[in-house]
């Protein structure tokens, strides 16, 4: 039994299909993040769960009840909008209890629910204010209060943090995560910010062009992206994609590419699968995260597959906690993430330590990961 | 306010300033002059007008013409003054303005937040109502009023003005609600509010400025309308404008200019009051909207 089930859901606007057969199940207490670039269909999918948009085909179930034709207010969901959508003419207290009032909850119960939610979100002192008199963060809290007070089965968040400034966004992100852990609520959360997706979720659905590209835990998505799109969309700076070719020798499998001076570099795959062996002699795209290319001292001590290659250090970008070093592998621009105090200078030949445990090969034709 | 205007205005020398005010005062005098003439002459006995200068101050101040215009002047065949017709106009204007504004708001709400197939064409057709001259609808309207049995009655006039005003009020509210965030409507839907609840509780409370615009527009138009009043009203439902015409253009007896002036001012007074009272709220409403972040 699943809590929220999206089964074969398609959405078309006229002849244009914007969502193609989406299948996702969410268990109770899960935090699912739908992430993708704008226009990928993630907000449309959320609106369809909410019942604000019609489903062209397929079905959505909440607690095993089919939601086709069920009005948004009867789905026992609550939604937090990007613009917060607070009613400008009502006070904070009225905003929060409006839904209960519409559901004919008696006044004493409404007051009790209001007090409880206000305590959780620390907005007791704001009850009599109008939304226009609140700061961005306060509005955000009120919008969440309006969702919490309904005690819904599923919370839907539509890019709730994108209107906040950078610092507040990080604070509210932590609060949302805390809220999820304290309430064990089931949440579907839409964002285009991959950091939000990684930090908040228990599972991520990466979407592009109306397709779910990959559905998995943050670790799965980050370490073993299903294709080049997911690899480059998740992670910042994004994964290095290096043109290479596969060479088999004595049963070992190597990725061959070139460094900045044109010398051939052979990188040995730790446990190559059958599929990868079959690429012998063919070209692949080798995906390596920036943090898997470091200075030798900063390399992961637990990894047994660190390989050191000589390469020219390009532009150096100190970023406080890390230093980013540009370099060229196989003709592609790469970024290495080194320790903050790595001794590296622009233009010098430097030893780069590459952690091949974290390397992911992709097929250059269909762009899928070679498993 | 004063501080801001001093800081933001272009710096001008005192001579330029004197000149500016002089020109402004001259222009306002020029525009106020007709009204001053009306007021002065409505406060004179008739003999002073016929025998003397229109522009002169009254030698004997009197409110007699006002009382006569309001209560005793000959309108058509009855010596009733304008007062019954004033009430006729009120009885016509108030429901007509209220109904057309209300329906316009509902139309705007449906056309922006409950879109349906062909809604833009529908709206386009409604806009035609704003361009059709009054005269064109006279005969069809007479037929409709005849069929519905409303001819020659105040409800009939209310119907005419509601139908005619709907194009304008729909246009106002539709454009206003276009800018109203749809997310609010969606939030209310999830909160469980139905069609009318969303309208009453969410949209209308935020519609102050546009309601005032609609009321001012409709009130002035309907109050000042002569053609429909003259065409479709009976003796006991004739509005103020028609009565004023009857007062001024009666062809027998002495032309009582002072009474005519007083009558004309009485007829214009309500629109003036609406502008002064509602205009303030209008500006206030706009300010409230702009401060909201």
Image (cartoon, coloured by chain):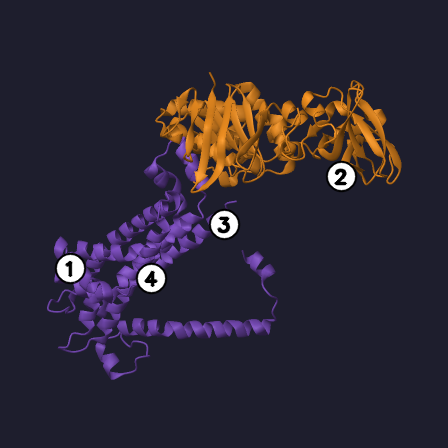
- Of circles 2 and 1, the one toward us is 2
- Drawn side of residue A2 relative to residue B102, left or right: right
Q: Name the residue beneath numbered marker 2.
A: A332
- Of circles 2 and 3, the one toward us is 2
- Whether pointer 2 and pointer 4 mark residues with C-beta atoms closer than 8 Å, the reply is no
Res. A115 in view: no
Q: Nearer the viewer, residue A178 or B155?
A: A178
Q: Find numbered disc 4 in the image and state the secondary structure of the residue it sits on.
A: helix
Residue A215: x and y, percent? Answer: 57, 26
Of all residues, the one furthest to the bottom in this rendering is B51
Identify the residue at horizontal 55%, vertical 35% (top origin).
Answer: A159
Q: Name the residue beneath numbered marker 3.
A: B290
Q: Name the residue beneath numbered marker 1.
A: B143
Question: Which of marks 1 and 3 precedes in the sequence?
Answer: 1
Q: Name the residue beneath numbered marker 4.
A: B272
Q: Report the quarter where the C terminus of chain A lies.
A: top right
């Amino acid at each position: 039994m699943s809590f929220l089930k999206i089964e074969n859901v398609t959405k078309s606007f006229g002849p244009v299909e914007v969502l193609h057969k989406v299948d996702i199940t969410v268990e109770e207490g899960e935090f699912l993040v739908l992430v993708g670039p704008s226009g990928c269909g993630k907000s449309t999918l959320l609106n369809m769960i909410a019942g604000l948009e019609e489903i062209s085909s397929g079905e959505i179930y909440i607690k095993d009840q089919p939601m086709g034709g069920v009005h948004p207010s009867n789905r026992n969901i609550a939604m937090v909008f990007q613009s917060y959508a607070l009613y400008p003419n009502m006070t904070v207290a009225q905003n929060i209890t409006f839904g209960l009032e519409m559901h004919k909850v008696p006044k004493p119960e409404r007051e009790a629910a209001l007090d409880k939610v206000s305590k959780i979100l620390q907005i007791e002192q704001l009850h009599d204010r109008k939304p226009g008199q609140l700061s961005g963060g306060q509005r955000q809290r009120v919008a969440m209060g309006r969702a919490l007070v309904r005690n819904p089965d599923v919370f839907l968040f539509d890019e709730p943090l994108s209107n906040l400034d950078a610092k507040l966004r990080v604070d509210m992100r932590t609060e949302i995560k805390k809220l999820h852990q304290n309430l064990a609520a089931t949440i579907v959360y839409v964002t285009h910010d991959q950091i939000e997706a990684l930090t908040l979720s228990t599972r991520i659905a990466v979407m592009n062009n109306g397709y779910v590209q990959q559905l998995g835990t943050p670790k799965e998505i980050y370490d073993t992206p299903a294709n080049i799109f997911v690899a480059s969309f998740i992670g910042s700076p994004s994964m290095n994609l290096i043109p290479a070719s596969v060479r088999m020798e004595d049963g070992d499998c190597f990725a061959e590419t070139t460094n900045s001076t044109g010398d051939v570099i052979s990188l040995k795959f730790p446990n190559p699968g059958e599929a990868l062996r079959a690429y012998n002699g063919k070209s692949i795209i080798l995906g390596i995260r920036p943090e898997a290319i470091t200075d030798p001292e900063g390399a992961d001590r637990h990894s047994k597959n660190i390989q050191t290659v000589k390469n020219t250090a390009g532009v150096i970008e100190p970023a406080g906690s890390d230093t980013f070093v540009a370099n060229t592998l196989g003709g592609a621009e790469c970024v290495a993430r080194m320790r903050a105090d790595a001794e590296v200078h622009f233009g010098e030949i430097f030893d780069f330590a590459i952690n091949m445990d974290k390397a992911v090969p992709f097929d250059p034709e269909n762009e899928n990961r070679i498993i | 306010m004063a501080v801001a205007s001093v800081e933001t205005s272009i710096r001008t020398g005192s001579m330029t300033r004197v000149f500016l005010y002089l020109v402004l005062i001259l222009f306002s005098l020029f525009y106020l002059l007709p009204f001053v003439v009306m007021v002065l002459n409505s406060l004179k006995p008739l003999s002073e007008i016929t025998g003397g200068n229109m522009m002169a101050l009254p030698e004997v101040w009197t409110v007699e013409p006002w009382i006569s215009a309001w209560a005793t002047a000959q309108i058509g065949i009855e010596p009733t003054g304008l007062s019954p017709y004033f009430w006729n106009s009120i009885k016509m204007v108030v429901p007509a303005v209220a109904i057309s504004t209300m329906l316009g708001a509902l139309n705007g709400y449906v056309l922006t937040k409950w879109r349906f197939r062909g809604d833009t064409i529908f709206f386009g057709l409604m806009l035609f109502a704003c361009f059709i001259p009054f005269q064109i609808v006279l005969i069809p309207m007479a037929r409709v009023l005849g069929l519905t049995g409303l001819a020659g009655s105040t409800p009939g006039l209310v119907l005419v003005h509601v139908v005619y005003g709907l194009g304008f009020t729909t246009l106002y509210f539709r454009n206003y609600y276009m800018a109203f965030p749809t997310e609010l409507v969606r939030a209310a839907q999830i909160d469980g509010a139905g069609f009318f609840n969303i309208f009453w509780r969410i949209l209308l409370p935020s519609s102050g400025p546009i309601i005032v615009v609609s009321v001012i527009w409709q009130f002035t138009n309907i109050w000042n309308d002569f053609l429909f009043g003259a065409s479709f009203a009976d003796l006991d439902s004739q509005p103020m404008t028609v009565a004023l015409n009857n007062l001024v253009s009666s062809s027998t007896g002495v032309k009582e200019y002072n009474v005519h002036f007083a009558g004309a001012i009485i007829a214009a007074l309500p629109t003036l009051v609406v502008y002064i009272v509602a205009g303030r709220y209008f500006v206030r409403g706009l300010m409230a909207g702009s401060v909201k972040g």
